[in-house]
């Protein structure tokens, strides 16, 4: 089966229309229709069917579309590799960053990085922790900045502490709780809670902390995965609570007007680590990038 045909078929499935795919691919609609017919002849059955909002893949069509997407992605990566080589770049470094890190210090780090002539392309991926760990396992990333307290695949990856941190209960600066010298868990029972990093593979999520505080019967009103700025805005405008890492939230506190409560009990740590596959350490790009991260963390007062 022609790989090009599969890549084109994937575009049809994504757009749900042969006509739209033809415009996207800059080919005629009859040409794409013939390609679909060629694929169906090889399969021995239909790969598309009419749906309510356009064409939809059959079971085998969905599988072929996934293969076509991968072919297209690899082709695009090959094109980028050639372009980078022509521009004098000797390779690429693929970095994963969790949403909280991406929303806080990492932008400042990238600004400083932009001023350096690294000699290789830097690709940044920001996703929840569980997805970044999977990408590391599949070798789709070279390193990732994630909390060290992740309960998945720790035996297959190595991690080095980037900086230490701890969790705290945050609220608006206008919340009456901020006036108290010491806040007990019972003071928090009737408050509205929001949860971040839900289902991300982290230990020490909002639910874990609520259990530790003896508030296991309290349920968060909202759960947010892969996004933290909305949580900051929500806290600033409402009498609600959220669990955040202290050092990282220092970047958000002044922007959104949120502060940590002085709790009567100690909350869990939330250290940030540099995660890699063991064989990635010792490579020039990875080691250089890690050294730059450490320099930034020291200058920024994270360590």
Image: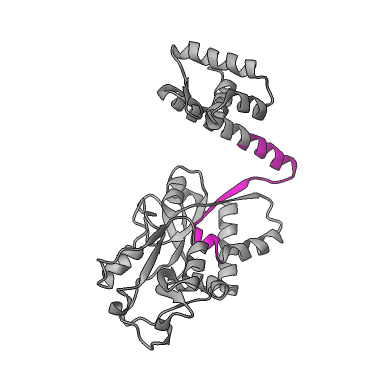
Asked whether residue 94 is drawn in magenta, I would say yes
Q: Above or below — where is 280 with respect to 3?
A: below
Percent x, y for residue 166? Answer: 41, 72
Q: Is residue 103 above or below residue 67?
A: below
Say which quarter of the image contains residue 286: bottom right
Q: What's the colour scheme?
A: one colour
For the residue pair 38 and 129, the one nearer the viewer reads as: 38
Q: Which residues are magenta?
A: 77-104
Horizontal placement of 108 versus 253: left or right?
right
Along the horizontal axis of the image, is 70 left or right of 89?
A: left
Vertical placement of residue 191 versus 282, above or below: below
Identified at 50% across, 27% down, the residue is 65
Q: Residue at x 35, y 86 (%)?
A: 182
**Residue furthest toward the bottom?**
181
Q: Position of residue 64 (x, y in %)?
A: 48, 25
Q: Position of residue 243 (x, y in %)?
A: 40, 69
- Residue furthest front in the image: 52
Residue reaching furthest to the right: 87
Q: Position of residue 10 (x, y in %)?
A: 54, 28
């Amino acid at each position: 089966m022609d790989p090009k045909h599969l890549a084109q078929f994937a575009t049809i499935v994504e757009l749900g229309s042969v006509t739209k795919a033809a415009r996207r691919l800059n080919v005629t609609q009859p040409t794409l229709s013939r390609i679909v017919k060629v694929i169906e002849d090889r399969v021995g059955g239909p790969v598309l069917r009419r749906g309510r909002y356009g064409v939809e893949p059959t079971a085998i069509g969905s599988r072929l579309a996934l293969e076509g997407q991968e072919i297209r992605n690899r082709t695009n990566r090959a094109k980028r590799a050639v372009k980078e080589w022509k521009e004098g770049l000797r390779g690429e470094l693929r970095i994963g960053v969790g949403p909280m890190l991406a929303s806080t210090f990492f932008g400042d780090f990238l600004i400083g990085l932009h001023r350096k002539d690294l000699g290789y392309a830097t690709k940044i991926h920001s996703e929840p922790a569980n997805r970044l760990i999977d990408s590391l396992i599949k070798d789709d990333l070279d390193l990732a900045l994630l909390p060290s307290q992740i309960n998945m695949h720790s035996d297959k990856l190595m991690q080095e502490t980037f900086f230490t941190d701890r969790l705290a209960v945050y609220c608006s600066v206008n919340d009456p709780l901020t006036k108290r010298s010491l806040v007990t868990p019972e003071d928090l029972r009737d408050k509205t809670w929001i949860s971040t990093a839900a289902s991300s593979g982290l230990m020490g999520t909002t639910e874990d902390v609520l259990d530790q505080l003896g508030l296991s019967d309290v349920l968060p009103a909202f759960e947010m995965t892969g996004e933290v700025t909305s949580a900051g805005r929500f806290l600033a405008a409402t009498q609600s609570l959220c669990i955040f890492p202290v050092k990282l939230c220092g970047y958000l506190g002044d922007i959104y007007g949120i502060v940590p409560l002085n709790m009567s009990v100690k909350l869990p740590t939330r250290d940030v680590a540099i995660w890699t596959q063991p064989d990635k350490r010792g490579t020039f790009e990875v080691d250089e990038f890690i050294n730059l991260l450490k320099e930034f963390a020291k200058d920024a007062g994270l360590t």
